[in-house]
Image: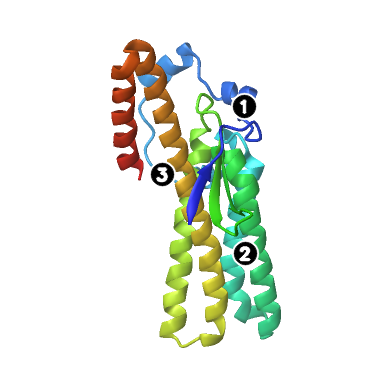
Amino acid sequence: MSTQTVPLLRTIEPDDPSAENAHKPNVGSQQRQNLAPSPAMASNHNDAESALPGILRQSAHPVVLLCLYFFRVAAISVYILCGLFTNNYVLSTVVVVVLLAMDFWNCRNVAGRRLVGLRFWNQIDEDGESYWVFESRDPSRPANPVDSRMFWIAIYAFPLCWLLLFVVSIVRFNLSFIPIVVLALVFNVTNAVGFTYADRDAKQRWASGVAGSGWNSGIGGIGGQIMTGVVKNSIGKIFG
């Protein structure tokens, strides 16, 4: 399967500048924070409950972040707890599959684009050859660090959870539920692999562009082209 990249398209919107500026502390408040003792881990129940509101307050897209985790947690919760509320296998399967499909679509087309500025899809050309297309946001406008961290946690943690459930289904001989877990693994692993390659492609193109613009203007001529080629090859080995 070949890959094809597209330039930094305008369809990847930057985070709201007002939201980013709202979270930048001024110099005075930063100095006061440095003088105060650094907070430790949550010491009581109220501190622990404030963790989620704190993350949402720092997020540039709290609704998108909530939807990302809602669909993923809901799919696993329904799969695990469906036996406590109903014995209807068809109903449980349909609900889990619908949640998985909604999560797959939301993660690939909404959450990835808004939270980390990445999107990918698979395209088939006229010759019938399938290839990946990656899209990324302008690197001069980075993603919100809270959004980025929570997004990658969701991308990599939930496939591991479904993998654990797959092992449990085999050990307990719940063969009727294995197709659901396999479908969940396909959806989650596809998103994980796609966004990993999209992120790697964005970093590689950004580094190649910096190397090309910097050394070609500074050295020029054949020497600049040689140095640019060396840097591109080195970056290609680092990012795969």
> Residue 136 location in percent, x, y?
55, 37
Q: Mark 1 highlights which residue?
A: 19
Q: Are marks 1 and 3 in contact (CB under 8 Å)?
A: no
Q: Amino acid at mark 2?
A: Leu
First in sequence: mark 2 vs mark 3: 3
Graded by Cα atoms within 10 Å as few (under 14), some (14 to 19) or many (20 or more), the crowding at tag 1 reads some
**Label 3 neighbour load within 10 Å: few <14, some 14-19, many 20+:** few
Q: Position of residue 198 (x, y in %)?
A: 49, 44
Q: Which mark is residue 187?
A: none
Who comes first in sequence, dot 1 or dot 2? 1
Report x, y in % for residue 226: 29, 24
Cβ atoms at labels 2 and 3 below 8 Å apart: no
In the rendered view, tell whether residue 145 sits above or below residue 213: below
Write down the residue under mark 2: 100
Q: Nearer the viewer, residue 116 or 42?
A: 116
Query: As shown in the figure, which amino acid type bears the numbered disc 1?
Result: Ala
Q: CA distance from mark 1 to mark 3?
A: 29 Å
Please give the name of the residue rendered at 66% of the width and 35% of the height, measured from the top-left corner: 11
What residue is disc 3 on? 43
| Label 1, label 2: how far apart the Cα atoms are | 31 Å
Residue at 62% of width from left, 23% of height from top? 17
x 56%, y 46%: residue? 133
